[in-house]
Amino acid sequence: MGYSNTHFKSINPYTQETVYEIKKHTQEEAREILEKAQAVFETTWEDTSYEKRAELLNAVAKDMKENLDYYALPMTEEMGKPINEARGEVNKAAWAAEHYAQFGEDYLKTEFLESDATESYVQYLPLGVTLGILPWNAPFWLAFRYLAPALMSGNACVMKHDSHTPLCAVRIIEAFEKAGAPKNLVQNLVVGHQSLESVIRNPIVKGVSLTGSSKAGASVGAIAGSEIKPVVLELGGSDPAIVLADTSDLEKAADTIVLSRYINAGQSCIAAKRIIVEEPIYEEFIELLKTRFEKLKLGDPKDESTTIGPIARKELVDEMHNQVDRSIQAGARLVLGGQRHEGQGFFFPVTMLVDVNPGMVVSCQETFGPIAAVIKAKDEKEAIKIANDTEYGLGGSIWTGDVEKGKKLAGKIVTGQVSVNGIVKSDPRLPSGGVKKSGLGKELGPHGIKMFVNTQQVWVGPVK
């Protein structure tokens, strides 16, 4: 991305050409955006019926699905997501909107509880203006993961979308405008990170959602906490995929783990990053993984046959090479990839390291790219210990032929999400969110929509 005092500029990671340039908002313009959001909340959206809120979300979803490439191409051009993945992301974002349009009212229905009152109940009321601080790696999905529940619960939304994907943010705002959203209900704030503290501290902002690094989460969480404002943090991850010796279908396990590792060129918080394999099947599973990783095609993200596009920025490529080189120096065995890319685009080769120990860089740090770290465990007890030997706790998976054992072991893994014999993924129907340095609070499902509401208890007398 090109930086200046007045503009953000996105750069295509495949061609290095400028994609889009946008003017930054001044401090005064930022305050005006918040004030406009507060005005539309008070005058319109707070008292809009669930039916009308649902109509808006469904209209946005319909437009995005009917104009798929219009919304998908900016992702491909600004951060290198292969076009087929970008289309899938638009559809998934639309699904989030449709899901909350259908179920949001039910999730927030008034709950009647027995007490000494004639009547007592809990109702869920909107907070007002919420702020969503969003990353570049899934520009549409992560925006709608915040927007859909927040809007359905009656809040006005201000995005601070990532400065590396400004055109994606513009298209999201366009989708709401085309769908007939009240003016200023959904806005994008174009400011740098250094301006965020004053925005978070503004009394208009009633809640903050951030998806980003653990470092960013600690900073934003501290500011929001000092203002006593609710905050949801979805942060980094180093997800374990545990493959036990009794796994009934190793081929399927390998297929799924490889998919989890390479999707979005590995630039995913919930990717399978540490592959922990029980000793009896260790060498066999390495070969299954290697065979599959070797078939993946790097290339032009606009090419329909490309499976792995470029990494979003050159400095991220350099950082990954540093992680791999340091791990090899510490004793990891390189079986695939690792070489510097020569030619067009910010590519990182599909890389597989085996004989990784928990103390190595690729095991301790989050690897945000197509790097697979394979670790041997002597038994399931050691596998669980290794899985939990990290500061992160986002997601994880267990592969076993004994589903009941898998369910029991799931409770031993210290993460916010566990999949047994399946891929770790986000789903509008189910809550997601991490523990430890992977986050705070939940998103999606019936739990996520209640993060930015006033859970108000009402007691009606007289005493029974």
Image: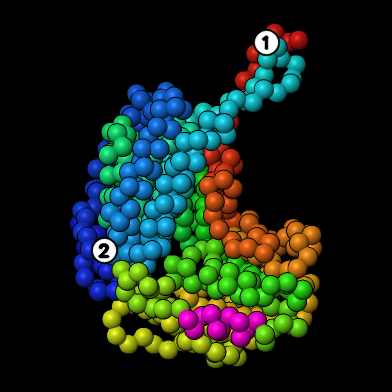
N-term mark: 2 or 1: 2
Q: Where is residue 316 drawn, in percent x and y?
A: 40, 74
Number of residues whose C-alpha sits closer than 10 Å to that of mark 1, classed few (under 14), some (14–19) or many (20 or more): few
Q: Magenta stretch: residue 293 in it?
A: yes
Residue lying at 42% horizontally and 72% vertically, measured from the top left: 307
Q: Are circles 2 and 1 on residues that touch, CB within 8 Å?
A: no
Q: Is residue 27 shown left or right of residue 462?
A: left
Residue 183: mark: none
Residue lying at 28% horizontally and 81% vertically, measured from the top left: 344
Q: Is residue 133 above or below residue 252?
A: above
**198 vs 204, nearest the viewer:** 204
Please identify the quadrant where the N terminus is shown.
bottom left
Residue lying at 63% horizontally and 71% vertically, measured from the top left: 252
The answer to which image quadrant residue 327 occupies is bottom right
Label 2 – label 1 distance at C-alpha: 59 Å
Tag 2: residue type? Ser
The answer to which image quadrant residue 244 occupies is bottom right
Number of residues whose C-alpha sits closer than 10 Å to that of mark 2, classed few (under 14), some (14–19) or many (20 or more): many
Residue 461: mark: 1
Q: Is residue 449 above or below residue 376?
A: above
In front of the other: label 2 or label 1?
A: 2
Q: Which residue is mark 2?
A: 10
**236 vs 194, nearest the viewer:** 236
Tag 1: residue type? Gly
Q: Main secondary structure of the magenta part?
A: helix
Range covered by the magenta-colored residues: 285-295
Query: Can the viewer see residue 322?
Result: no
Q: Where is residue 212 drawn, in percent x and y?
A: 46, 59
Residue lying at 24% horizontally and 43% vertically, measured from the top left: 29
Label tally: 2
The answer to which image quadrant residue 424 occupies is bottom right
